[in-house]
Amino acid sequence: MATTSVTPAPLLHGIVLDWYRENARDLPWRAPDASPWAVMVSEFMLQQTPVKRVLPAYAAWLERWPTPAALAADAPGEAVRMWGRLGYPRRALRLHAAAAAIVERHGGEVPADHAELLALPGVGEYTAAAVASFAFRQRHAVLDTNVRRVFARAVTGEEYPAQATTAAERRTATELLPDHPEVAAAWAVGVMELGALVCTARGPECGDCPLRPHCAWDRAGRPPYQGPARRGQSYEGTDRQVRGKLLAVLREAHGEVPRQRLDAVWPDAVQRSRALDGLIIDGLVEPVGSERFRLPA
Ligand code: SF4
């Protein structure tokens, strides 16, 4: 089994599992009675949105749509409306499409099989592994940004991972995976939580980190990142911001909206029109004739 340069993997497992038992946040999708559907909803929401903003949206979503069948029976536009201000609203359409496929192919039950999960619309490698691991306690390498950062530092000795997941990272994650499925599932969520709470992107709290004695990056003197420039998170003035403003009008309208109401949200006509065209192409907005718009029916 793989090790950091000197630490046997089972020792790392024990350290992370002990830390997780003491420090894990009490989050609803981790409750023993959280359904596989609830886990799947949380994973879609958490992909690009912080936990604090996801919590109320997650609760409202599951109250309205406690099963895939309940969501699939509603219009995709209702999913976009309920997505609210979580950002990256195409995730709402994908979750709706996944719910419809779960009803059609799996009798309304979220499948436990990794390949069947992966075959659902909008479900990529990460989400399939996360749902199989967290909802069904299976053994899968779950590589989200937090896990990748912990492995980059503790195992590889680099401050940040590459922009996109590499084959080497997958190999490391797979080699470090505990053999027992239950332990592997606990390890996956434990490393993720350590990355979210301690080994954070900008200010890792190494003094509080249980992995510090074994951390390759810390041992190397915490050398600065040498890779290509990392993407910023700018929002103000971007097409994303304009899309958000246009969608907000449509979400609140509960029906069709004339173009003039959309024109009022952003002064730059070229950018506004580009943003609206993008929303239509993405299936988030439907034109009704040439001058009226609505969420997808
Ligand atoms: S010691 Fe610091 S850099 Fe290393 S894993 Fe812990 S928090 Fe991250």
Image: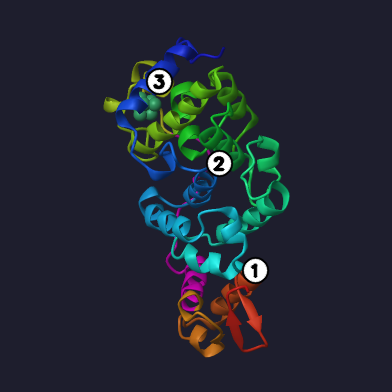
Residue beneath the point at 27% across and 26% down: 207
> Which picture quadrant has residue 166?
top right
Q: Residues within 10 Å of mark 2 (few under 14, many from 20)?
A: few
- In the image, 159 versus 116, the foreground residue is 116
Q: Position of residue 249 (x, y in %)?
A: 47, 78
State the image coordinates of residue 92 (x, y, percent, origin top left). 56, 60
Give the image location of residue 51, x and y in percent: 39, 48
Q: Give residue 271's quadrant in the image.
A: bottom right
- Cα distance between the residues tagged 1 and 2: 28 Å
Q: Quadrant of ligand 1?
A: top left
Residue 287 is left or right of residue 143, and the answer is right
Q: Residues within 10 Å of mark 1 (few under 14, many from 20)?
A: some
- Image coordinates of residue 185 in percent, x first then y, are 51, 28
Q: Quadrant of the N terminus?
A: top right
- Range of residues picked out in magenta: 225-249
Which residue of the protein is positioned furthest toward the left in this rendering? 207
Q: Is residue 61 left or right of residue 289?
A: left
On screen, residue 52 above or below 165 = below
Q: Amino acid at mark 2?
A: Gln
Kindly tell me whether mark 3's CB lies below 8 Å from ligand 1: yes
Residue 235 inside the magenta-drawn segment = yes
Residue in the image at 52% along x and 50% along y: 41
Q: Amino acid at mark 3?
A: Cys
Of 44 and 241, the residue lying toward us = 44
Which residue is under mark 1? 283
| Residue picked out by circle 2 | 163
As measured in the structure, the alpha-carbon distance from the residue carrying label 3 to the one carrying label 2 is 21 Å
Is 4 contained in the magenta span? no
Would you say the residues marked 1 and 2 are in contact, meaning their CB atoms lie under 8 Å apart? no
Please tell me which of labels 3 and 2 falls first in the chain: 2
- The tag on residue 215 is 3
